[in-house]
Image (cartoon, rainbow, N blue to C red):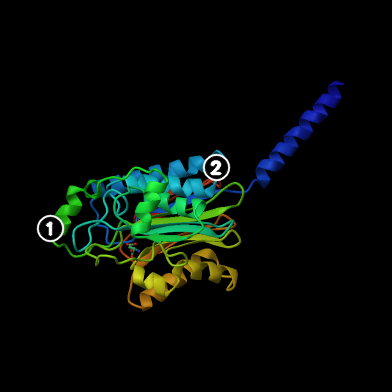
Amino acid sequence: MKRCLFILILIGMVLNAYLSFAEQPFAIIVHGGAGSYGNDSVVNQKIKDVISFAVEQGYAVLEKGGSAIDAVETAIRILEDSPLFNAGKGSVLNEEGFVEMDASIMDGKTLKAGAVAGVRDFPNPITLARLVMEKTPHLLFAGEGIERLIDKFNLKRVSPKSLITPERLEEFKKQKESQRKGTVGAVAIDKNGNIAAGTSTCGMANKMVGRVGDSPIIGAGTYAKNSTCGVSCTGHGEFFIRQSAAFQVSSLVELGKFPLQKAVEFVLSEIKNMGATGGMIAIDKDCNIAFDYTTMGMPCGFKSSKGDFKVIIFKEELLNK
Ligand code: ASP
């Protein structure tokens, strides 16, 4: 009897070890926008702290068995709520001094996606994008339609002014050279191997009213497909649209058999050859994490069940232990 029990326990242990070994690895990567970051260590640390928090919160969702979509939305909402990034609160102002935000989200399992462009009075455009994906038969909303969505789902509007921070107002008043940075994005793969990606931004400072960038354009700023990868972009949107940047990465992985990192680097170099800069984050179906940028820096953080964890602004920081 004792022997039988011992064998049963042993089988249980072996099975458990096998199952945890065979478990699909999961991961999340987030970015805070490619751009010209300086070496003010206090400012940089503040940025890294928020990126780190977004990574940890998104990872916690995955660890509990939550979906990649939930992890992506969770991480992006944190970045939208921080005044340090050009999304949600802290958005840059357009040429007339108000904000018009864009966002998109995509589910790599179903290839469903949702997006909004020109949001003026809602602090978390990524959540609106998700509502479009899950609760409407459509993909992209703009203008008056967004106002109706907000009412339809009984969401709370905020005053457009409450999204403007004193720093952004100061930049606007000084008509500062458009410092293109601070877009946010996230890509995750969950325990079921489902991949999701999302991006949220207020685009370029001093942009013309009504200008829409790549961030709400599926295939340009955001893309996710379970059999290939998820991608979120940041950079000069017009060029990312012309290159179908995020979709191109997925296609290079699928048809060109490019390793993920090479695909990201290739598309960014194509965009650079056209005269524009930016950055990308990505995760593939095998839980490989990739990112790159052609600007001075890009806040970026990732965490995986394989034990990776890093938060950086400059690539050189990857060399530091
Ligand atoms: N891609 C964004 C846009 O063009 C801006 C950025 O990522 O910095 O709207």
Residue situated furthest bottom in the rendering: 274
Q: How many numbered badges does the structure rendering display?
A: 2
- Quadrant containing the N terminus is top right
Q: Quadrant of residue 142?
A: bottom left
Residue placed most toward the observer, 216 or 274: 216
Residue drawn at (50%, 58%) of the image: 113
Q: Position of residue 297 (x, y in %)?
A: 32, 60
Answer with left or right where residue 176 lies relative to residue 272.
left
The disc at residue 301 is none
Q: Which residue is mark 1?
A: 173
Q: Position of residue 153 (x, y in %)?
A: 42, 45
Question: Ligand 1 shows up in which quadrant of the image?
Answer: bottom left
Q: Quadrant of residue 207?
A: bottom left
Q: Secondary structure at mark 2?
A: loop
Query: Relative to 54, is 176 above or below?
Result: below
Q: Which residue is mark 2?
A: 66
Q: Position of residue 205 (x, y in %)?
A: 24, 62
